[in-house]
Amino acid sequence: MKLVKQTKRGFQYQLNQEEANSLRHLVNQFPFTGLSPAKVSKTDSNAIEREKLLNESMAGHRRELKRQAGDLVSVDKFKASGSRQLFNINPEERETMLQILNDIRIESWKSLGEPENLEINVVELPKDKIRHYHFMHLSGYFEHHFLNLEE
């Protein structure tokens, strides 16, 4: 994946077919873990009501991000260019994509038990954790490229 064009109106990235398929699959998985309820305070008597409002707001935000995730990787965002795919995204969509990818990366990391060392031997992982390992690294790969850090 590489940035091929950047204007005030947006960004154009070139992806090989495997990258395009991986990005679509990854983003369409969002969210793949449940929302963890937020705790405001253990001592505040009004905390229960505020926690309820906060959790409802977070759930609504997550539903909206899920909807946007599908739009971001819809078929019309990709155009064939030989054996490659051109992916067009405006600055606002890019920020949303980065937020979704970061959420996937963090959710995956938490699912793996929040390891300090990210270089985990994948063969030692339980089968149900292997996809989290791959999602964590794949979302990091795409974040790196969307932030144009490969230059």
Image: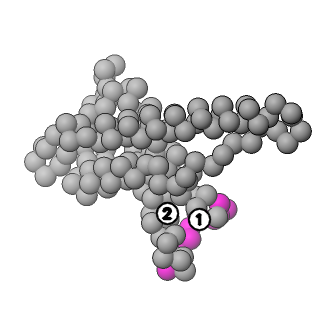
- Upstream in sequence: badge 2 or badge 1: 1
Q: Residue at x 58, y 48 (%)?
A: 35
Most foreground residue, 136 or 61? 61
Within 10 Å of disc 2 (Cα), the crowding (few <14, some 14-19, many 20+) is many
- Of residues 13 and 134, the one drawn nearer to the viewer in this rendering: 134
Q: Point out the image quarter for the C terminus.
A: top left
The residue under label 1 is: 112
Helix, strand or loop at label 2? It is helix
Residue, x 89% and y 39% (percent of image)?
43
Asked if 120 appears above or below 74 in the picture, the reply is below
Which class describes the residues within 10 Å of circle 1: few (<14), some (14-19), or many (20+)? many
Residue range in magenta is 114-123
Tell me where residue 51 appears, x and y as whole percent: 71, 36
Residue 63, x across and y down, in percent = 46, 38
Callout 2 touching callout 1 (CB < 8 Å): yes
User: Which quarter of the figure has residue 135?
Assistant: bottom left
Can you tell which mark lies on residue 132?
2
- The residue lying toward the viewer, choosing from 49 and 7, is 49
- Queried whether the magenta region covers residue 27, the answer comes back as no
Q: Amino acid at mark 1?
A: Leu
Residue 17, percent from left and from top: 21, 54
Label drawn at residue 35? none
Quadrant of residue 91 within the rendered picture: top left
**Secondary structure type for disc 1:** loop
Main SS, magenta region, reads loop
Q: Amino acid at mark 2?
A: His
Give above or below for 122 relative to 83: below
> Can residue 148 be spotted in the picture?
no
Q: Quadrant of residue 58?
A: top right
Q: Is residue 32 visible?
A: yes
Q: Residue furthest right?
A: 43
Residue shown at 40% from the left, 53% from the top: 29
